Image (cartoon, rainbow, N blue to C red):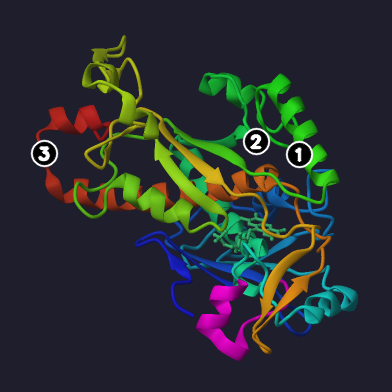
Amino acid sequence: MLGNTFGRLFRITTCGESYGKGKGSGLAVIVDGVPPGLKITREYIQKELDKRRPGVGKLNSPRKETDQCEIFAGIGQDGLTTGAPLGIIVYNVDTKKIHVEQYRSYKDIFRPGHATYSFFLKYGEYQDWCGAGRASGRETVARVAGGAVAKFILEREGIEILAYTKECMGIRCREMTFEEIKKNYRKNEINCPDLEAAKKMEEKVLEIKQQGDTAGGIIEVIAHNVPPGLGEPVFDKMSALIAHALCSIGAVKGIEFGAGFRVANMKGSENNDQPYIDNNGKIRFKTNNAGGILGGITNGEDIVVRLAIKPTPTISIEQTSINMRTMKEEKLKPITRRDPTLLGRIYAVAEAMMAIAIVDALYMARAYDALAKLDSKWMKLKGVY
Ligand SMILES: Cc1cc2nc3c(=O)[nH]c(=O)nc-3n(C[C@H](O)[C@H](O)[C@H](O)COP(=O)(O)O)c2cc1C
């Protein structure tokens, strides 16, 4: 299997699966590029992991994972990072025989909507049939742990990242400022800051759950207070790096920046963001249709990204599939353990991947700035003095 590392200077490498064989199975991340002298604690990382933990509410999978992390490398005797790679592990605890046997009972029948068919084609008889292996949503535990480290670094830079549910099955969160969203962040299970819309969304999801089915939706991810100058103008556009980070999350089926697909029906005069000079002498924009990125480079406005999240593929409704061993059509029985919607958990993964992409771009931009030696006027505008 290729491609288990993301990032260039700030890099995460993840390994592990939901039902690895033997004692000590779990998910781990190695984070490379951690500055020395940071007081990153397991409690800090745990706070992020708790956001995506299953088994904590009516909209969550009943899987009982405690997702407790341990830092096993990169912290010195004084409790600070040494600059060495940071290693974090989360052990699987809910891997009972009864669940393994359930997976075994349909291991040759691929699950519509899940990755099993393509995994059969790529890994043949060795494909991990138990709990979807690396295609399991559980793989994202390691990303969230790595993303917590990135968030810690961003906090020191004054950069905040948050994601929330924008839409679910046609019910939409009203337009809100960053501060309003922050105030109502994680106030309900579906993590929608518009409390009225959240109630309707949750009712809708529960209604769909009753039918044995699952629901999709839209997540918005905002990076606030990002300095201008991140990203490169050709292949490494900030939007392309973010798309790589976010589209690598399972179940993400669409991405848009700023006004996104609405630009298709806008006039230039409506879409162009008009600049002004604020009270601090900084150039700002009256609107943010660009979503904080112009020509692949951040412009100092919030980076605003929306992701279309598909309904959880595992459903409690009988489906038709193919048995890959007999090559015959077969019925796939209802499967019970799953999230009725991924919206209440996937946002934590989106925040993590956004944080990692931004820290990586910060490293690149600072390295470039150190050598570029532009006139101080441009450095000041960028916020580099
Ligand atoms: C946090 C998270 C949790 C997930 N939980 C489940 C789940 O419980 N059941 C399921 O069928 N899919 C779940 N998925 C989605 C599958 O991993 C994903 O749909 C599958 O790998 C197929 O990939 P694709 O949807 O990107 O094509 C989850 C994804 C994420 C990010």
Residue 217: % across, % down: 61, 40
Q: Which residue is mark 2?
A: 169
Q: Position of residue 159 (x, y in %)?
A: 45, 36
Does residue 383 appear left or right of residue 120 in this picture? Answer: left
Q: Name the secondary structure under disc 1.
A: helix
Camera sees residue 258: no
Say which quadrant the C terminus sits in.
Answer: top left
Instruction: Say if disc 1 is inside 8 Å of ligand 1.
Output: no
Q: What type is the residue that disc 1 sits on?
A: Val
Is 379 left, or right, of 48 in this rendering? left
Bounds of the magenta span? 116-131
Q: To which residue does mark 1 refer?
A: 205
Image coordinates for residue 183, horizontal then vertical, percent: 64, 22
Residue at 81% across, 64% down: 335
Earlier residue among tags 3 and 2: 2
Residue found at the very far left of the displayed protein? 375
Circle nearer the N terminus (3, 1): 1
Examine the rendered structure and indicate whether residue 354 appears above or below residue 118: above
Q: Residue 25 lies in magenta, yes or no?
A: no
| Label 2 residue near ligand 1, CB within 8 Å | no
Q: Is residue 61 left or right of residue 311?
A: right
C-alpha distance separating marks 2 and 1: 8 Å
Does residue 361 lie above or below 219 as drawn?
A: below
Distance in Å between CA atoms under marks 3 and 1: 54 Å
Q: What residue lies at 20% left-to-right and 50% top-to-bottom?
A: 368
Determine whether label 2 and label 1 are within 8 Å by CB: yes
Q: Which mark is drawn over residue 231?
A: none
